[in-house]
Image: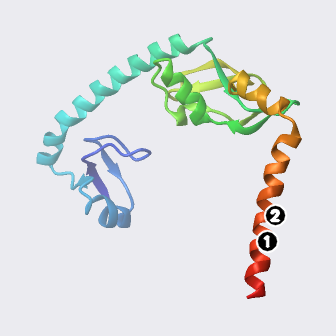
């Protein structure tokens, strides 16, 4: 069945385009949701302006993505994660983490535009592909480094380490003796 698209649908077509789809898909999905209409002369003329507007928007978006690819090419970012002594991360660095780091730097990159075969799970340097369109891609360098431990106040650290164990032990022994005498007095009643 031939239909005229009223909205751009991925893998089907753009607004104002007449496409051939299966009858059930047109009747049960496109037409009830008003994503398509029958391709009459009046409808085609009505959606022609929307198609031209969409194509102009696509052209502008393409130019912005080309500029972004030029600024991203050769960019290096650093992501800090907790790891063990052997360099294996507690967790991983995913596409979303890389996209968020790029967004912090002012680059409009979505997580689905970052290409990773699998999440990064060790401390190392990785070449990661950012693909903004089918033919617009670039390589960035991602440094995964060990996260520095949280700064613990030095005074709190040294007092806990230098406090003798015998200073806290009598208090604990007294508390446990009090509870044991209470339990025996309750059972004797």
Residue 94 drawn above or below residue 168 = above
Alpha carbon separation for disc pair 1 and 2: 6 Å
Judged from the image, the secondary structure of the residue bearing numbered disc 1 is: helix
- Can residue 42 be seen? yes
Taking depth in this image into account, of 97 and 85 the one nearest to the observer is: 85
Residue 63 placement (x, y as % from top left): 39, 17
Horizontal side of 105 relative to 40 (left or right) equals right
Give the position of the C terminus as an image quadrant.
bottom right
Find disc 2 in the rendering and name its residue. 177
Tell me what residue is drawn at x 88 percent, y 42 percent.
166
Find disc 1 in the rendering and name its residue. 181
- Can residue 144 be seen? no
Horizontal side of 165 relative to 121 (left or right) equals right
Residue 140 placement (x, y as % from top left): 63, 18
Tell me what residue is drawn at x 68 percent, y 27 percent.
150
Tell me what residue is drawn at x 53 percent, y 29 percent.
100
> Does the residue at mark 1 contact the one at mark 2 (Cβ under 8 Å)?
yes
> Based on the displayed image, in which of its 4 quarters is residue 160 positioned?
top right
> Based on the displayed image, in which of its 4 quarters is residue 23 positioned?
bottom left
Horizontal side of 95 relative to 50 (left or right) equals right
Tell me what residue is drawn at x 26 percent, y 60 percent.
31
């Amino acid at each position: 069945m031939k239909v005229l698209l009223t909205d751009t649908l991925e893998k089907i077509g753009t607004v104002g385009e007449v496409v051939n789809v299966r009858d059930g898909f047109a009747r049960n999905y496109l037409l009830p949701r008003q994503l398509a209409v029958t391709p009459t002369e009046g409808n085609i003329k009505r959606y022609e302006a929307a198609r031209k507007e969409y194509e102009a928007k696509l052209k502008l978006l393409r130019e912005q993505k080309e500029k972004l690819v030029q600024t991203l090419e050769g960019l290096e970012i650093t992501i800090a994660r907790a790891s063990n002594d052997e360099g294996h991360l507690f967790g991983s660095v995913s596409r979303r983490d890389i996209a968020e780091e790029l967004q912090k730097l002012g680059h409009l990159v979505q997580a689905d535009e970052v290409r990773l075969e699998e999440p990064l799970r060790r401390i190392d340097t990785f070449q990661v592909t950012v693909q903004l369109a089918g033919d617009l891609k670039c390589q960035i360098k991602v440094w995964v480094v060990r996260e520095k431990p949280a700064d613990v106040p030095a005074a709190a650290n040294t007092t806990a380490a230098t406090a003798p164990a015998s200073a806290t032990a009598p208090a604990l022994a007294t508390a446990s003796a009090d509870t044991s005498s209470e339990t025996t007095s309750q059972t004797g009643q």
